[in-house]
Image (spheres, rainbow, N blue to C red):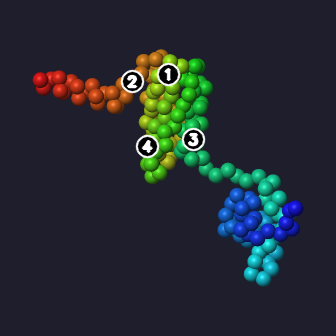
Amino acid sequence: MEKPFYTTVEAAAALSITAARVRQLILDGEMMAEKVGRDLLIPAEAIEQARQRKTKPGPETIMERLKRIGNEIVEESGGRYVERVVLPQAQDSNDWDICFRTPADKEYCAHVIRRASQTDDEIKKDILRQLPVGGNAPASKKVRAKKTAKKKRGGAK
């Protein structure tokens, strides 16, 4: 049986938000509540209305943007890529790697540096510039570094 009234903590749990957010909704007039002594009691109907209310989504995270852009690249690749993986980075990092797998199980990665003013199209162009065109993959920085080290060692002998 549903309770007729909820405390702010119970309402927060029911709505998957914080108690502070519930109090803010009440102060903003977006949720009904009755003050009983020192407590705010929220009617069950107000909680149901809050569940039904459409909320604006927050801004997209860089991880969500890269996943979406990666999915676009896979869809537009004409079968050249079958999967994308965004590699998680350190929390304060602006450097991201996004990798794409081909049907032949080859993996190509692009390095993305997040800039606040960068548009999705600019990010996409930056990623595509680092991926192979027609199957000819540019050597990654790691591969180039190994080749350079081998040449230096070979030349010194």
Residue 151 showing in the rendered view: yes
Residue 122 showing in the rendered view: no
Quarter of the image with the N terminus is bottom right
- Location of residue 2 in the rendering, given as x and y in whole percent from the top left corner: 86, 62
Q: Which residue is mark 1?
A: 105
> Which amino acid, by three-letter code, is at mark 3?
Arg
- Determine crowd level at label 3: few under 14, some 14-19, many 20+ residues with C-alpha closer than 10 A: some
> Which amino acid, by three-letter code, is at mark 1?
Asp
Q: Give the vertical position of 2 relative to 105 (above or below).
A: below
Residue 95, label in figure: 4
Question: Does the CB distance between marks 3 and 4 fall below 8 Å?
Answer: no
- Kindly state the secondary structure of the residue where label 1 is placed: loop
Whichever of callouts 2 and 1 sits on the residue coming sooner in the sequence is 1
> Which amino acid, by three-letter code, is at mark 2?
Pro
Q: Give the vertical position of 28 relative to 115 (above or below).
A: below
- Location of residue 53 in the rendering, given as x and y in whole percent from the top left corner: 79, 55
Whichever of callouts 4 and 1 sits on the residue coming sooner in the sequence is 4
- Specify the quadrant of the image occupied by residue 39: bottom right
Whichever of callouts 3 and 1 sits on the residue coming sooner in the sequence is 3
Whichever of callouts 2 and 3 sits on the residue coming sooner in the sequence is 3
Q: In whole angstroms, how far apart are the C-alphas of marks 4 and 1?
A: 25 Å
- Location of residue 65 in the rendering, given as x and y in whole percent from the top left corner: 57, 41
Q: Which residue is mark 3?
A: 65
Residue 14, label in figure: none
Whichever of callouts 2 and 4 sits on the residue coming sooner in the sequence is 4
- Kindly state the secondary structure of the residue where label 4 is placed: strand
Please name whichever residue, 95 or 123, is drawn nearer the observer in this view of the structure.
Answer: 95
